[in-house]
Structures are given as structure tokens and as C-alpha cells.
Image (cartoon, coloured by chain):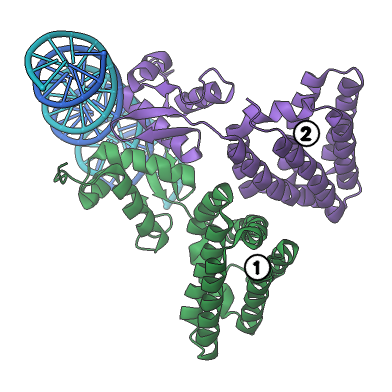
Chain colours: A purple, B green, C blue, D cyan
Amino acid sequence: MEVSSQGYTEEECYRRLRDAIIDGTLMPSQRLVEMDLARWLGASRATVRTVLARLEQEGLVERERYRGARVRHVSHEEAVEILEVRMALECLIARYAALRATDEELRRLEEHIAWMRRQYEENDLLSYSDGNAKLHRTIAEISRHHTARRLLDTLNSQSVRYQYRTILAPNRSAASMNEHEKIVDAIRRRDPDGAEQAMRVHLSHVCDTLRGMRSGF
Amino acid sequence: MEVSSQGYTEEECYRRLRDAIIDGTLMPSQRLVEMDLARWLGASRATVRTVLARLEQEGLVERERYRGARVRHVSHEEAVEILEVRMALECLIARYAALRATDEELRRLEEHIAWMRRQYEENDLLSYSDGNAKLHRTIAEISRHHTARRLLDTLNSQSVRYQYRTILAPNRSAASMNEHEKIVDAIRRRDPDGAEQAMRVHLSHVCDTLRGMRSGF
DNA sequence: TGTCACGAAAGCGTTGACAATCCGCGCAAG
DNA sequence: CTTGCGCGGATTGTCAACGCTTTCGTGACA
């Protein structure tokens, strides 16, 4: 019943380091020196060590014995692979979202897609892109498919850096808006096949777009 | 250039502990006391700790602060979820296997499926079940889809205990044999859609079988 | 000038000790 | 008999120190 005044707990360190990698504070292939991280996080080296082990298992970090850890670099090819796997999993959760959505959740979905349309029409592609990510997260939540959700979380963390670009491809945003509305429509109709199909169409287009970008810096 | 005489390395401990969990040497919800494991593995407590952290991230172990780690118990519902995710991913790799298989690999596949048929006809369901798992691993390998493969590995490790049962369901083995041959046929024809479809049919049947078993054993 | 040995510094791996927390047990009060 | 309380053992979390491997700069030598 005491507010621990001593450094941060492992879980907090994990979150903070993970976020730092995901939001780009720590760049790919940047070295992660345990002592530096320990000081930065206000924790011991041992704690940092286990956190790095977890992040390695998650695919965000690579470690080499006696040579330390670094932020893992995700190649273009791998980003495509990740997106393909995402496609498979998001189809699954779209199906379950259509089967399991409550009325309240449907209302939230519609509200959200309406908000996205506004951002789209105002040409605010950055907000639109955020809303995009959030829509996918919401659908995952509604699906109540714990296993698929957990995997999608880690996959997304690995490839966030690639996600912003596809929206910016020429003429992509109009199609994207349309595709997302089809997904929400199908879920609203409680049509699992339709939802899965709409999600498959959407993500296969994103896949094609990403594949079309050759090593986009 | 020295054979390390000092205990086992982290990676070895990881493998050994992981295998012990997967093959059932360590039972679900069994406590994993760091000191005991350290002695058993011939490693330090710190090493065991990071290994446990990795296994937690992998979903094989659960840790509670100040209360230690235990082998995670996979519920029936979760086993179904895992199988559903597997279905999504295996369809993906079946597709890629059909696209990427070399002649040599096709030869290996045919050889393997012929071997499985022999076990099946001799009614050796245990060998058949092993061959089954191996067939899926081989297809994953042939697909060269690194990301999907990695995820499938961890998923399989979580649900091995459930895999043996589905084959033993009444009348299931005949259908299973047939379905597997269809998958291999499609890959041999280099027909990605067919391979994906055959895999989907196969695993949806397995799914149904597993769903039909209420709280198996 | 190129290269090779060597030594120092950086940083990882391991150990042991100590602090914090949980859990089961006995005991007393209601 | 039940409930609440405190205590000791068991186990985890944290830390600092030490040994080991890698890396990199420096100087001798061809």
C-alpha cells in the first residue's frame, strides 16, 4: 500500500521502451546500450535486460550475444509479409465483429466512420490515417477474438512506419474511404461473409499499393 | 574459441524450457520457481528470469509480479481461437507454397504424403498424426513466408496438447487423409487458389471437430 | 603506406547479496 | 466456529560489483 518511490517497474519500462521504438524516438538499427537505457528509464540494468528480451521475442529488437541489442530494421519485403499476415487476421476479426457487435458498438462504428469521412472531405489525410488505424483497432476489439487481437497488436507495432505512406499514394484515399465504409456496412448488416470479403478487398489493395512502392526509403 | 564449460547459454535454456513445456514435462499451471529452474538448467537465476520473460511474451508462460511464473493453461475456447488463426495463416502459406515450390520440394511433398497414406492404411494413427504435423511444417517451409512461419511456430507450441485429439475423432482420419492429399495436389499443380481453398476446407473441418469436443478430456 | 599485434576501453554476462512481497499458520477476539 | 491479525518462511525484484568478449585506436614493422 505504498507508492513505490524506487524506479519504474518492469511493465512500465517495457511500455515506455516499446513506445519509443514504435513512435520512432529510437531509430531502426540504433544501438540500445543497457546502461544508457537503465539511466533513461530510471531502472536497473537487470530490468532493462529482461525488457529487451521481451522486445526481442516481439520482433521489435534484435540481440546478439556480447554485442548488445539494437532496434530491428523492417525491410520492405518484410513489411509486405506483415501486411499479408495482417490481411489474413483482419479478415478473421472482421467476420467475428459482424457476428458479435452489440448495438452500442455498431453506433460507435458508424460515428467513427462518419468522422473519418469528414476528415477525408476536408482533405486532412493525417487525421484520416489516424482514424484508419483506430477503426481497425475498434473492429479488433469488437471481434472479441483475443488471440487474433494480440497477434495484430504486435504485427502493427512492427510496421507502423510503413502505414502512413500507403494513404498518401495518389488516388488511394478515395478508394480507401470507400472500402472502409463497405466494411462497416457489412458489420452493421451483421453479415460475416460480407465483412470478411470487404476487409479482404481493402487490404489486398493496400498490399498492392505497398508492393508497388519500391523500397520507399 | 573455447567450449564454454560454464553452464548453458540463454538460448539453450530457452529451447530446453520451451521444449519441456511443449512436450508436457511441465504441466499447465505448474509453478516455475526460478531457483529450481536455474539448478535444473545449470544456469543463473538472471538467465532463467529473462528466459521466462521471453516465454511469457510467447504465450507459453504467465508471470505475476511477486508471485512467480507458471505454465500457462490454454482453455478449450482459446484452443479454438488458436486454430482459427492457424487456419487463416496456413491458407496464406499454402498459397505461397503453391507459388514457390521447387521441383525438389514437390518431390519431397509427394514422398511425404505417400508415407502418410501408408501409415493411415496400416491404421497407425499416432505416426499419421506426427506426419500430419510435419506436413504442415514442410508446407510452411516451402512457402518461404518468414513472418507467417514464425507466428505459426508459436501458435503451434501453445496448442500441441490439443492437436492429437482431433485425429482420433470417429471417422475423422479418412477425411483428413483425403483433405491433405487435395492440398498437396493443388500445390503440385502450382495452383495457389486451389491450395488455399483445400487448406481452408481441411482446417475448417478440424475447427468444427475441435468445437464439437466440449472441454475435451 | 599497408597491415598486424596488442592493449585499453566499452559494454555484455554472471554472480551474490539484500529488500520487497506474498502466503500459510497459529492465535486471540467476537 | 468464524474472522481478523501478525509473524516467519519462501520466492521474487533490485542492485552493485566483477569477469569476459568485442571493438577500436595506436604503434611497430615490412
Question: Badge 2, how many Cα within 10 Å: few under 14, some, many 20+?
Answer: some
Residue at 38% x, 45% y is: B69
Residue at 65% x, 63% y is: B98
Looking at the picture, do discs 2 and 1 lie on one chain? no
Q: Work out whether residue A78 or residue B34 is closer to the camera in this orientation and state it.
A: A78
Is residue B13 among the parts visible in the rendering?
A: yes
Is residue B217 among the parts visible in the rendering?
A: no
Q: Work out whether residue D16 or residue B146 is closer to the camera in this orientation and state it.
A: B146
Q: Is residue B24 above or below residue A113?
A: below
Q: Work out whether residue A214 or residue A84 is closer to the camera in this orientation and state it.
A: A214
Q: CA distance from mark 2 to mark 1?
A: 36 Å
**Residue B132 spot, x, y in % from top left:** 53, 72
Q: On the rendered structure, is B212 left or right of A184?
A: left
Where does the N terminus of chain B fall, quadrant-wise? top left
**Residue C13 spot, x, y in % from top left:** 25, 35
Q: What residue sits right under mark 1 in the picture?
A: B187
**Residue A108 spot, x, y in % from top left:** 84, 33
Q: Chain of mark 1?
A: B
Q: Closer to the camera: disc 2 or disc 1? A: 1
Find residue B143 and name its label. none
Q: Is residue A204 above or below residue A178?
A: below
| Amino acid identity at mark 2 | Leu
Q: Quadrant of residue B4?
A: top left
Looking at the rendered structure, the secondary structure element under dot 1 is helix
The answer to the question of whether label 2 and label 1 lie on touching residues, with beta carbons closer than 8 A, is: no
Q: Quadrant of residue D17?
A: top left
| Amino acid identity at mark 1 | Ile
Q: Chain of mark 2?
A: A
Q: What residue sits right under mark 2 in the picture?
A: A135
Looking at the rendered structure, the secondary structure element under dot 2 is helix
Q: Is residue B118 above or below residue B77?
A: below
